[in-house]
Image (tube, rainbow, N blue to C red):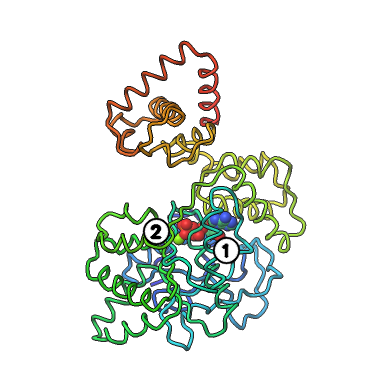
Amino acid sequence: LWGKIKNELADVVGSDHYRNWIEPLRFAGLNEGTATFHVPTNFIGDWVSRNYSDLILGRLKAAGVPVTRLNFTLPQHRTQPRPSAAQPMAAAPRPAPRQAQAAGGGGDDGLPGAPLDPRFTFDRFVVGKPNELAHAAAKRVAEGAEVTFNPLFLYGGVGLGKTHLMHAIAHELTNRRDGLRVVYLSAEQFMYRFVQALRDKQMMDFKQLFRSVDVLMVDDVQFIAGKDSTQEEFFHTFNALVDQNKQIVISADRAPNEIKQMETRISSRLQCGLVVDLHPTDYELRLGILQQKVENQRQQYPDLVIADGVLEFLAHRISNNVRVLEGALMRLFAFATLVGREINLELTQECLSDILRASDRKISIEEIQRRVSEHYNIRLSDMIGPRRLRALARPRQVAMYLSKQLTSRSLPEIGRRFGNRDHTTILHGVKKIEELMAQDSQLADDIELLRRSLEA
Ligand code: ADP
Ligand code: MG
């Protein structure tokens, strides 16, 4: 089956990419929804995991394989990998990653968790304004001294570090306290487990297992919204653990009360601890993350030369999603190593043209709201919030105006993104700014500046 999927992938990714990245993968087994592939070097593993995970997962699922996660590791008892032209990366002198078993995934303690990514530690999490609260809260939970807020609910958009923080908590807790039963899994895995237990008539075991953990972490909980019996079971598990004063950590792509088809009694329970959001990354955070990733790769590629301005360019041009940012950097490294050139702006533009084009493509309303709120030094949440203070209303109107000017969204659509305001409110805001700009050249300049930075 993998052979067949591989062939399909060849068509999708093109022959060069196929030869470099897909061809070397060796299917090594499926366990608890995790498909493991052996890779000749960690670099290839990293690369494939960052760039092709979704694609491979999608193909496997489409072929009926019950898989939710991919894992790329070096073969356990590997002999020296055979160098070949098809594998441009010299075998990395990096030790094989210790496949963390902290969450009990596949461990012999029978805990129902998924494996942890050994790279997702606090050390490797770069802290900036947009994520400092989430980071601080995660750190606090990771100290594990006492249960101060339960649950910790982390939310935010794709690729902003929710999973990273959760794994970091699990790593730290298990390092600090031997024998602590920490279970991390996605809500999707929770559901599979649940359905499986129902089917195999092992609900008692299921309940007992989940009620006996010390710390439960469920990632992407929005997944079980609308899945009634899974929600119900999750709710019982949740309550049982809270009653025992066991720590729970939950993540989702949005706030608890914004998860549609999540029962109100559940979402209100989810809010009774601490709810913190990861904000979209800003330029500084992106730059910090890039610098850190470069440092991490340094050990592996001591000769890598990156010209001044390249990281700044990437931080500026590539969107919020840290995963995309990392993917871009990895590709750059691979490409530079392959062609033996230093990484400068020219190479960067050449190598990342598709990614750069994609992030150029459209300016989103969210992006406009973020830039405008940064510019006026107000909170992003006040952009869409109800407060009528003049100090908030003006920036909000500026953002409405720019949304009308720079996106193809209709007034009602814009209204929805400004906290469900009526389209007449948006129209009023746009008109107001047009009027003011005609009288106030300072404001006009300001807006022109914002427009240019958004279009840059
Ligand atoms: P989410 O679960 O929110 O979609 P992830 O936790 O999977 O996002 O993060 C996506 C990628 O970006 C991961 O490789 C993660 O290590 C990286 N990442 C996200 N935020 C940070 C950060 N602040 N510092 C370092 N790496 C980060
Ligand atoms: Mg995640």
Q: Amino acid at mark 2?
A: Ala
Q: Secondary structure at mark 2?
A: strand
Is there any visible trace of residue 51 in the rendered image? Answer: no
Position of residue 63 measured from the top left corner of the image (x, y, whole percent):
33, 67
Q: Secondary structure at mark 1?
A: helix
Query: On the rendered structure, is 50 left or right of 268?
Result: right
Instruction: Give the numbered dot on residue 46.
Output: 1
Query: On the rendered structure, is 253 left or right of 43?
Result: left
Determine which quarter of the picture holds residue 150: bottom left
Q: Nearer the viewer, residue 145 or 22?
A: 145
Position of residue 253 measured from the top left corner of the image (x, y, whole percent):
39, 55
Residue at position x 36%, y 59% in the image? 271
Residue at position x 55%, y 78% in the image? 174
Q: Nearer the viewer, residue 19 or 161?
A: 161
Instruction: Give the numbered dot on residue 252.
Output: 2
User: Is 233 drawn above or below residue 323 in the view shown?
Assistant: below
User: Is 212 drawn above or below residue 228 in the view shown?
Assistant: below
Outermost residue toward the bottom in this view: 108
Mark positioned earlier in the residue sequence (2 or 1) = 1
